[in-house]
Image (tube, helix red, strand yellow):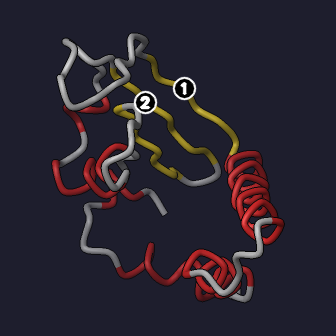
Amino acid sequence: MNPAFHVLPAAIRERHSVRASGDGFAWPDLLIVPDGDQTRFAWESDRQAISNRPVRFMGRGDSWVGGDIVRHQLGALVNSVLTRLSEQGISGTALAREWEAIQQTSQDEALLPCCCTPWPRSVRRC
């Protein structure tokens, strides 16, 4: 099993888990954990097929990516989704409103949750 799944407390793992936030979609067991100017991606394979999941993820790994690259690529993903929704005549979604709010967030506001978190400094590193 990937060490990231043991080292981080359960509450933090769930907060950074793509699968935990997947609303029933087939997502990999992937953690995305920002750590200073880097972001850690740690993923684990599904040990066995589960009848209510049509997809089984087979690979596992652990990688660090520059935070600027991650922010850029995730921003491009959200913009792409919003463009496709707009092309279908769908507007005013929660995603659009939340993305607009994120885009208008100042750098000081963006740092506030990190500075005020009760997580141990060894975990949050900000």
Residue 43, quarter of the rendered image: top left
Residue 118 vertical placement versus 84 (above, below): below
Label 2 element class: strand
Q: Residues within 10 Å of mark 1 (few under 14, many from 20)?
A: few
Q: Residues within 10 Å of mark 2 (few under 14, many from 20)?
A: many
Q: Which one is nearer the viewer's eye here, 84 or 13?
A: 84
Residue 45 vertical placement versus 69 (above, below): above
Q: Which residue is mark 2?
A: 42
Measured as percent of width and height from the top left, residue 94 is found at 55, 81
Residue 87, quarter of the rendered image: bottom right
In the image, is 110 to the left or to the right of 80? Answer: left
Label 1 element class: strand
Amino acid type, label 2: Ala
In the image, is 40 to the left or to the right of 107? Answer: left
Marks 1 & 2, CB-CB < 8 Å contact:
yes
Q: In the rendered structure, find residue 20 and report the number of the disc placed on it.
A: none
Q: Which one is nearer the viewer's eye here, 59 or 91?
A: 91
Residue 46 vertical placement versus 27 (above, below): above
The N terminus lies in quadrant: top left
Q: Residue at x 65, y 36 (%)?
A: 65
First along the sequence among labels 1 and 2: 2
Measured as percent of width and height from the top left, residue 114 is found at 44, 73
Q: Which residue is mark 1?
A: 63
Measured as percent of width and height from the top left, residue 42 is found at 43, 30
Q: Residue at x 70, y 61 (%)?
A: 78
